[in-house]
Image (cartoon, helix red, strand yellow):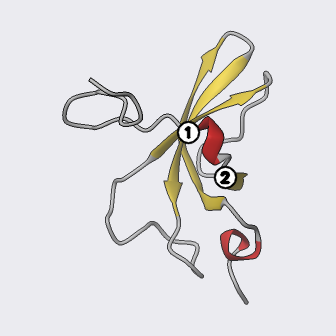
Amino acid sequence: EPSASERLPNSLAGRVAWTEMRGDSHVVALTPSESGTDGPTAGGGQQVTIEIPGTSPPDVGEPIVVRVRPDLLNPFDPATGMNLFRST
């Protein structure tokens, strides 16, 4: 059976690594799952950080699927911290 991220366009499946409250939202680190499995990606340790609205975050270790809106992405270079979509 295909994984949830394969069934939904523009989505990412994984498990919650940690959460941090930020006012009326939460920052959540998601460790992506490999396609078709429930385990961590082969790259190990790589996480995606997302912000979700609300006061009740998912639990650490909980499997979740998030829909990705490309128009709202803000990717950063891990070496420099610079936003990859902004010019110098």
Q: Which x, y percent locates residue 2?
A: 70, 85
Foreground pick, 59 / 37: 37
Above or below 80: residue 29: below
Q: In this view, does 76 lie above or below 1?
A: above
Q: Residue at x 72, y 66 (%)?
A: 9
Question: Could you say which quadrant of the image residue 20 lies in?
Answer: top right
Nearer to the camera, 14 or 7:
7
Q: Name the residue under label 1.
A: 73
The amino acid marked with disc number 1 is Leu
Closest to the observer, 2 or 59: 2
Q: Which residue is drawn at 66% across and 50% down?
A: 68
Examine the image and state in which quarter residue 1 appears.
Answer: bottom right
Most distant residue in the top direction: 23
Q: Give the x, y percent position of residue 31.
A: 49, 54
Name the kind of residue labelled 2 in the image: Glu
What residue sits 26% from the left and 23% below the top?
A: 88
Q: Residue at x 65, y 25 (%)?
A: 26
